Amino acid sequence: MLATQRTRRTREHTGPTPHSVSIRAKMPSSKLPEHLLLERRRQEDLREEAILITKYNKMFDLKNDWERITDRSIQKNTVQRRVKDLMEQRKLELDERRQKLRELLSAEDEEYVREMEAKHETLEERQNKMCERAKLLKAKRETERQAFVEEKLDQQWREQCEELRGVLSRRHQDEVCVDRMQQLAAKADLERRKQEEEAMYAQLWEKDRLAKAAREEQEAQQQIERNRFGIKAMVDTLRTQKASLQAKKLEEKRLIAEEAKLLIEERELRSLEEERASQQKRLLQKQHKSSLEKSMKLKLQREAKEQQEELALDMKILEQLLEESRNEAHEMVERKHRRREEEQKYREFLQQQLEEETRREKELDRLIDVDVAAMWSKRIHQWKLEKEARNRLMRDVMETRRKQLQEKLQKLAYEKEVLKRDCEEIMAAVEEHNKLEDERVQRTKMINKNYESDLLAQIDHQKSKKDERKMEELREYNEGLQTEAKYQQRLKNVLSSATSERKTHPMRRPQFEVTGQKMV
Amino acid sequence: MFPGYSDAYIEPSSAQDERYSFIAEWYDPQAALIRRYQFLYYPKDSSIEMFDIKNRRKFLSRTKFESVRLEDLYIGSKVSIYSRQLTFVDFGDQFTESKLISKKEKTFALIKPDATSKLGVILNGLRDRNIKVTKAQMVQMTRTDAVKFYDEHQSKPYFNSILEYITSGPVIAMEIVGSGVVQKWLEMLGPSDPSEARTSNPKSIRAMFGTDELKNTAHGSINATAAAKELEFFFPSSGAAFVGTAKYENSTCCVIKPHAVKEGLVGDIISVIMDAGFDITALSMQTVQKANAEEFYEIYKGVVAEYKSMVDELCNGSCVVLEISGNDQDVPSKFRQLCGPSDPEIGRHLRPKTLRAMFGKDAIQNAVHCTDLPEDGILEVEYFFRIL
C-alpha cells in the first residue's frame, strides 16, 4: 500500500513538499485526571444503594410474608379452634343428649320391668279375688238352700194343716158341686141335643130313603127312556146309513154319466184331431209338391239353358270342326244319342223320387196313427186308475163308518153295565152306613150310662166324706180352741194367697170343654 | 375373608337356572366413584351373584341372600348387600326385561286435599291389589304449580275452582308400580263423578270418599304417557322441585322402617296414627344412605346395643318419613306413647295397643322409629325434610 493512498490520520497534515509532514498539536484532555476513580466511586455508591434497597425490600418482604402467614395461621387456628369448640360442644351436647336418652330409656325399661312385675303380682291378687268370689258363691248357695228349706217346711205345714186343707177341700167341694150342676145341665143339654140329633138323623134318613126311592124310580124311567132312546138312535143311524148309501149310489150314477160324457167328448176330440191331422198331412203334401215342382221347373230351366249353351258351344265347335273336317258329323249323331240316354236317365230318377215321396207320406201316416193310439191307451189307463181309486175310497169310507157304529154300540153297552154296578155299590154303602150308625148309637148310650153311674157313686162318696169331716171338725174344735187364733191367722194369709195360685185339676178342664162343645 | 363366603352348599350355577340380570351401581366412598356391577338373582334358591363389569371379574360368587326378594328388584330400587347400597339402573338382559317390564308399569297417583286423611285406607287398597308405592311426597301446591299441572283444563269453566280446591291443602303425590297398574288404579278410583260411582261401583275410592265431581278424592293418569309426564312434573329427575309441607313446630318425626314398608303395613300404621288424633303434616318416601343413617342415629351410638343393626335396617330399602304434629307442646312424648316400647315383645305384654306391638317383629324391625327425646323432634324432622 502506498503512502499516498493511506488515509490520513486526523492530526497529520502533509505539506507541499515530500516528506513534509506536520502534526497538529494535541488538545489537553477534558476529563479530569482522576475521572476513573470518580467513576468507580460513583458506581460503587450506586451498587451500595441498590444493595441497601434490595436488603430493605427483602426485609419487608419477609416481614410481609411473615405477617401474612401468621395471619393466615392465626385465622386457621382460630377457625380450627372454633370448629373444634363447636364440635366439642356438639359432642358434649350429643353426649348430653345421649345421657338423657340413656336415662330415659333406662327409666322406661325400669318402668316396664316394674310393670311386668306388677302384672305378676296381680296374679296373686287374682287368686285372692277368686277365693273371695268362691266364698261369695258359697254364701249365696247357702242362702238359697236356706230359702228352699223354708219353703219346703212351709209346704209341709200346709200339707199337714187339717184346717187349711179343710177349707181348701170345702172350696174344692163347692167347686165340684158347681161343676156337677154344670155337668148335669150339660148332660141334660147333651141328651136333648142327642135326641134332637137322632130325630134329625131319622128325618134325614127318611128323606134320604124317599129321595132314594124317587131316584130309583127316576133311574128306572131313565133306563127305559135310555133304552128307547138307544133304539131310536139305532134307527136314526140306520136311516142315516141308508141315506148315505143312497147318496153313494147317486154318486156312482153321476160318475157313470160323467164317464159317458167324457167318452163322448173324447170321441169328438179324437175325430177333431184326426181331421186336423189329415188337414195337416194334406197341407204338408201340397207344400212338398209345390216345392218339388218348383225345383223341377228350375232344374228344367237350368237344363234347357245348359243345353242351349252347350248347343251354342257345340255349334261353335262344330262350325270350327266343319271347317277342319267333315267326319265330325258322325260324332254329333253319337252325342245326340248320348243326350237322349241321359234324358232317359233323368226321367227315371224323377220317377224314383216320386215313389220315394209317396213312400214317405205313407210312413208319416203310419207314425201319426201309432201316436194317436198310444195317447188313447194312456188316457184310458188313467181313467181306469181314477175310477179304481174312487171305488177304493168309497169302500174305505163304508168300512170306517161300520166300525164307528160298532164302537158306539159297544160303548153304550159298557155304560149300561157301569150304571148298574154303581147302583149296587150305593145300595151296599147305604146298608153299611145304617149298620155303623146303629152301632154308634148303641155305644154312646153305653158310655153315657157308665158315666152316670160313676157320677152317682162319686156323689155318694163325697157326701159320706163330708159327713165324716164335719164330725171330726166338731171334735177338733173342742180340742184346739187355743191354737185356733194362730191357725186362723196363718190360714187367712195362706188362703188369701192360695186362692190365686190354686191350680185346677187337669181332669176338670176337658169336662167343661165337653159340655161346651157341640156334637159333630 | 371374601364377603360372600358362606358354609351353605350352593349348587353351581348352570345355564338351566332361571336368573334375572340387572346392572347395579354402588357409590364407593373410599374411591369416591361409582362402580357398576352385573347383578344376577336366582329365584330358585334366592341366591345372588355379582360381576364387576369394569375389571371383568367376579365380585361376589353365588351366595344365598334371603333378604332380597324378586319384588324388590326393579329399575330404581335400592338394595343393600353386605353394607353396600346398590341401585339398579338397568336390566342386564332381554329375558329380565321382557319378564319384568310388564310388572313394573308405573303410574302417577295424586291424593287430593280432602282425602289426605283417608291415606291409610287408600294405601291398604293398593296393597290388596298388589300395587307397590315407590315414591311418595306430601306437597303443598302453589297456584302456579296447579296451573302448570292442570294445563289442559285451562279453557274449562271450572278451572278456577279446581285450582282453589287443589291448593286448599297439602296433596300427596305417589308413584305406584305393578302390572297393569294404570288400569288398576283407574278402576280403583271409579268413575270421576262420585255420585255415579256410588251407583255403578260402590266399592271404589271416589264412591266411598268423594263428595262431588270437583272434590273427587284422588287423581290418576289416563295412560302411560300421561303418567310419565305427570311423574316428571312431581318427581323431576333433576332433583326436588316442591317445597315440603313440614312445619317444624310442635312436631315429632316418625320413620316407618323399610321392613314395614316392604310388608305393606304403611296403610295400617298411618290409619292408626290418624285414628289416635295426630296430624301428618309432612310425608316423604326416602331411601337413606348408610352415612346419613349413621348420622341420623348418632344419638343412639353407644347408648343402645343394637345401633349397628338399626343403621343397617334403616338403609335396607325405602322408608316413609312422617312429620307428626299436634296442637300442644308434648306431641313427641304423646306420639312416643302411641309407638310403645321399642321391643315389640314387651309391647305385646304391656301395651298391646301400641304401633310397635301391633306391627313390629323384633327390637330392630319394630315397624316405626319415633323421636325419643322430646326436644329432638324438630331436629329429626329438619334432618329429613330440610337437610336431606
Image: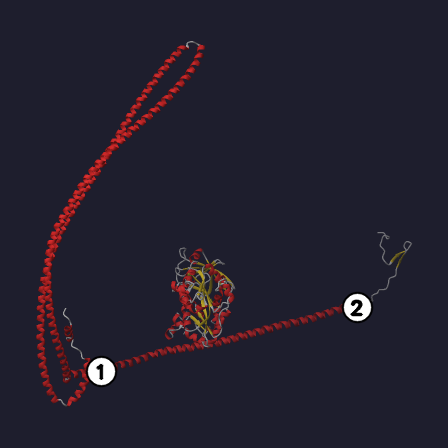
Percent x, y for residue A252? 18, 40
User: What residue would you read off at disc 2?
Assistant: A38
Viewer-nearest residue: A288 or B87: A288
Percent x, y for residue A1? 84, 51
The disc numbered 1 marks a residue on which chain? Answer: A
Percent x, y for residue B6? 41, 63
Taking the spot 8% from the left edge, 77% from the top edge, the residue there is A457
Percent x, y for residue B78? 46, 64
User: What residue would you read off at disc 1?
Assistant: A147
Instruction: Using the image, determine if residue B144 lies above or below residue A343.
Output: below
**Image check: A240 left or right of A10?**
left
The amino acid type, in three-letter code, at marker 2 is Leu
Between circles 1 and 2, the one closer to the viewer is 1
Viewer-nearest residue: B253 or A7: B253
Viewer-nearest residue: B29 or A332: A332
Residue that sits furthest to the top in the current view: A326
In the rendered structure, which disc, 1 or 2, sits on the residue that comes first in sequence?
Answer: 2
**Image check: A394 left or right of B388?**
left
Taking the spot 35% from the left edge, 78% from the top edge, the residue there is A119
The disc numbered 2 marks a residue on which chain? Answer: A
Viewer-nearest residue: A194 or B230: A194
**Image check: A1 left or right of B348?**
right
Taking the spot 34% from the left edge, 24% from the top edge, the residue there is A290
Q: Secondary structure at mark 1?
A: helix
Q: From this viewpoint, is residue B285 visible? A: no
